[in-house]
Image: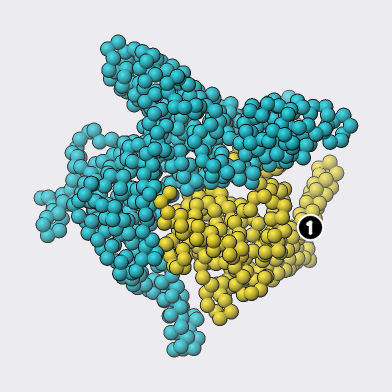
């Protein structure tokens, strides 16, 4: 047989390629070979104190405390927990009745309905294994199914009705609402369903499928796609989250993280995940909390290690660090702020009031007490402003070889031309403009600070008045946005919110569009009135009209 | 021979792979399966849905017939004029009559398609279809914003004007009333503005048989109309009260996760929902 050349037309090469492609696809994220690692900062600081060889101690401690990506869990220590809350037991925490109801409602509409329908209608042999609800399946195969094996298939008829309440210990099933007597399979299925909640392991799998590619295996914001995103994905390991309803620097509530999953962080790569059930979202939040706690524990352990002379990690140090970290997260709900604040209904406020209060907000914005303008600029355009806001950056030496090229690539440095008192650009002897290089201050994650441009009408942490109130009053954790000074009253903050919202509204695209259409209609009317048939000329006037109209709109944009 | 067999087998494998992945959504582990998954179009519930489906079937039948005829001719020719049966090539200048025939038939078919879709297209697309009986523009219910990678719906609030302080946003879920504009149950129209923040997206609601590209820098008025009888029929055997929104234009790496839902409410319930959202907008939760 003649040997064929090794080209893509060779069937063996083709077959090999295709087999290779098929074989290299791993559809089951549960089998991915992943392990938690130590962060670069950790390794660097261990190196600094000459303890690089002790890094296995840290990772070993972390594995004991938090498990692996395949089997994540918290180590239960005696004095760690208040009461009988067990973070490893799915659903065993402080979810409110409403949250449980939401979980049940979502589950009913989206998932497992078929399995539970079959259980309820007692067609047990047909119950298929669900892809996600591993726990549900485990309970079913362990407790329900053995009661029916053989019964349904012998004569093909329906299975004998077994009283589920008497057939198995109810407590094992996490269905405490199950009636003691007279329970039917339908009721059992319903309650099982209501109480379904993903286990930590299932949530970790979901994290791997949905979040890992940006946020990374250990939540460092360093997943494979993360480096292509601007802004970068959140690094959980600092334990800091921006869009929270607790005081600056405090750990987020579970609900804060659920809110971000529901709403997304608008105009970033973080989309809304509302397509998942409440149960799944709460499960994801549990796993994100675990990653954040793990990261925090890691950095604290490294500090402890550096402090000790021997470079050893005594057991009680590990334990106390772990308890400290836990305590912060456990108490997060108690730090909930602004729950009793009354939001002014300025949709019902008179125009005069709105304008007066907005004007007061503007004065505060431009004043040195609130000092908003120093980062957000006098026009409220923040990092997008043509002139760099004054306190956002500091001058660096352009010839300095320590300029970080990566930070530069991400817009971390800006050239600013020097001007004299009259606003004229200063030039050197050769006629080139004199300019300084500024380095924009980084936030806690090392990203260049980008104060919000209010005129774009985009607020990542939510655009409701209360969201803006919280951002102003308590600042944004981990960024250069500080909490409001003590001298600024609540009333002042609301005035600021009104002013900021008016900046956003002034350039509102829909409003510009409305004006444009109104102007076009007027033009159309006028031409029809004059010539009787002016249709053909409409399009020609389109562009001129738009620009005129835009200025009109800006004038009319007050309150 | 070996080549042919291998390629045939590979193509067959690809076909099976394609069908399996199409049929089994969970195969890709991309989140929950759509609640009422079907192999074909889902039930339609739009006032124009029947027209859209009729056009779909018209073209489907035409294309299928043409496909069978041309593929049959091709298969026959391959068999009939293979080297085994006909070892000598024949030179031909072609046939003028045949040329005319296979130009005229497709042209006629195209004309049939063109004429049969005109009224539906006009009803879907023209600005005049979004006016009331006095020629006044119908009010806009909400703005549909597409962005990488989610859908966001901005409602003007109680005052009906955008860019005021009572605007509220809904991520992921588009809530719309039935809105009986003309007092005619077959003529329901709710108008939206469709726009994009960044790149091309496409707003696709399979149940409403509606698909339109969202183009950055462009504001499009679009309308959706829900046939309440159809809706009631669909809702009768369905726990899930909302319908899929899909991005139908590859918009970037996260295109696959760009989904949303439409929920259609009777007018009174919709008003209640607006009240709830307004309360939430000025709430402190």
Residue B12, position in %: x, y? Answer: 74, 38
Outermost residue on the top side: it is A310
Give the chain coloured yellow. B
Residue A294, position in %: x, y? Answer: 42, 26
Mark 1 Cα within 10 Å, few/some/many (few <14, many 20+)?
few
* Chain A tint as drawn: cyan
Residue A472, position in %: x, y? Answer: 31, 49
Give the quarter of the image for residue A543: bottom left
Give the quarter of the image for residue A326: top left
In the foreground, B182 or A178: A178
Work out whether B117 lies above or below A453.
below
Residue A485, position in %: x, y? Answer: 23, 46
- Residue drawn at point x = 31 percent, y = 45 percent: A474
Q: Is residue A207 visible?
A: no
In the image, B17: left or right of B279?
Answer: right
Give the quarter of the image for residue A9: top right
Q: Which residue is mark 1?
A: B65
In the image, A207: left or right of A457?
Answer: right
Q: Quadrant of the N terminus of chain A?
A: top right
């Amino acid at each position: 047989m003649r040997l064929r050349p090794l080209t893509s037309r060779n069937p063996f090469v083709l077959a090999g390629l295709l087999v290779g492609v098929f074989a290299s696809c791993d559809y089951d994220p549960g089998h991915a070979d992943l392990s938690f690692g130590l962060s670069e900062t950790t390794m660097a600081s261990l190196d600094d104190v000459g303890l690089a060889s002790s890094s296995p101690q840290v990772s070993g401690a972390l594995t004991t405390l938090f498990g692996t990506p395949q089997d994540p869990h918290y180590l239960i220590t005696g004095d760690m927990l208040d009461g009988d809350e067990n973070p490893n037991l799915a659903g065993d925490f402080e979810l409110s009745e409403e949250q449980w109801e939401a979980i049940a409602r979502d589950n009913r509409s989206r998932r497992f309905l078929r399995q539970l329908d079959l259980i309820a209608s007692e067609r047990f042999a047909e119950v298929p294994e669900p892809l996600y609800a591993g726990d549900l399946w485990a309970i079913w195969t362990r407790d329900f199914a053995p009661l029916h094996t053989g019964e349904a298939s012998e004569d093909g008829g329906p299975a004998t009705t077994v009283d589920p309440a008497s057939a198995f210990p109810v407590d094992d099933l996490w269905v405490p609402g199950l009636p003691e007597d007279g329970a039917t399979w339908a009721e059992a299925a319903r309650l099982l369903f209501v109480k379904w909640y993903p286990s930590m392991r299932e949530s970790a799998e979901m994290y791997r499928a949905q979040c890992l590619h940006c946020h990374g295996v250990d939540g460092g914001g360093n997943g494979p796609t993360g480096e292509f995103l601007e802004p970068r994905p959140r690094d959980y390991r600092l334990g800091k989250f921006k869009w929270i309803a607790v005081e600056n620097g405090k750990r987020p509530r579970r609900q804060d993280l659920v809110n971000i999953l529901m709403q997304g962080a608008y105009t970033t790569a973080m989309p809304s995940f509302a397509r998942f059930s409440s149960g799944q979202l709460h499960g994801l939040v549990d796993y994100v909390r675990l990653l954040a706690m793990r990261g925090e524990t890691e950095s604290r352990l490294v500090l402890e290690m550096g402090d000790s002379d021997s470079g050893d990690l005594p057991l009680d140090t590990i334990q106390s660090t772990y308890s400290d970290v836990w305590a912060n997260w456990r108490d997060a709900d108690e730090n909930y702020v602004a729950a009793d604040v009354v939001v002014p209904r300025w949709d019902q406020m008179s125009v005069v009031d709105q304008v007066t209060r907005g004007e007061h907000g503007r004065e505060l914005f431009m004043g040195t007490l609130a000092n908003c303008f120093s980062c957000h600029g006098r026009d409220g355009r923040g990092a997008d402003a043509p002139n760099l806001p004054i306190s956002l950056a500091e001058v660096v030496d352009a010839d300095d070889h320590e300029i970080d090229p990566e930070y530069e690539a991400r817009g971390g440095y800006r050239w600013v031309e020097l001007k004299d008192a009259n606003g004229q650009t200063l030039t050197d002897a050769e006629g080139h403009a004199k300019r300084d290089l500024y380095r924009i201050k980084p936030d806690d994650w090392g990203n260049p600070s980008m104060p919000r441009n209010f005129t774009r009408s985009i607020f990542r942490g939510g655009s409701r008045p209360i969201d803006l109130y919280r951002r102003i009053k308590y600042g944004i954790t981990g960024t250069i946005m500080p909490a409001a000074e003590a001298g600024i009253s609540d009333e002042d903050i609301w005035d600021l919110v009104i002013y900021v919202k008016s900046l956003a509204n002034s350039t509102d695209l829909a409003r510009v569009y409305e004006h444009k259409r109104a102007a076009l209609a007027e033009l159309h009317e006028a031409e029809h009135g004059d010539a009787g048939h002016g249709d053909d000329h409409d399009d020609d006037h389109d562009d001129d009209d738009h620009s005129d109209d835009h200025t009109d709109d800006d004038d009319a944009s007050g309150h | 021979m070996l080549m042919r067999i291998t390629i045939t087998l590979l193509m067959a494998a690809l076909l099976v792979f394609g069908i399996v992945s199409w049929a089994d959504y969970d195969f890709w582990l991309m989140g929950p399966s759509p609640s009422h998954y079907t192999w074909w179009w889902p039930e339609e519930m739009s006032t124009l849905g029947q027209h859209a489906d009729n056009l779909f079937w018209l073209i489907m039948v035409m294309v299928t017939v043409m496909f069978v005829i041309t593929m049959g001719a091709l298969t026959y020719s391959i068999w009939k004029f293979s080297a085994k049966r006909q070892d000598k090539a024949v030179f031909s200048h072609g046939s003028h009559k045949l040329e005319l025939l296979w130009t005229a038939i497709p042209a006629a078919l195209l004309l049939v398609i063109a004429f049969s879709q005109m009224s539906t297209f006009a009803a879907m697309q023209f600005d005049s279809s979004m006016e009331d009986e006095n020629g006044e523009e119908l009010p806009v219910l909400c703005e549909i914003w597409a962005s990488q990678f989610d859908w966001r719906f901005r409602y003007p609030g109680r005052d009906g004007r955008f860019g005021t302080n009572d605007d509220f946003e809904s991520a992921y879920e588009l809530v719309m009333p039935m809105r009986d504009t003309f007092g005619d149950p077959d003529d329901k129209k709710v108008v939206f503005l469709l726009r994009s923040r960044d790149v091309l997206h496409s707003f696709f609601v399979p149940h409403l048989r509606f698909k339109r590209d969202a183009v950055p820098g462009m504001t499009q008025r679009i309308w959706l109309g829900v046939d309440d009888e159809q809706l009631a029929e669909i809702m009768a055997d369905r726990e899930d009260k909302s319908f899929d929104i899909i991005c139908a234009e590859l918009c970037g790496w996260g295109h696959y996760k760009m989904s949303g839902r439409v929920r259609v409410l009777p007018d009174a319930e919709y008003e209640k929902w607006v009240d709830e959202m307004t309360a939430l907008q000025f709430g402190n939760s």
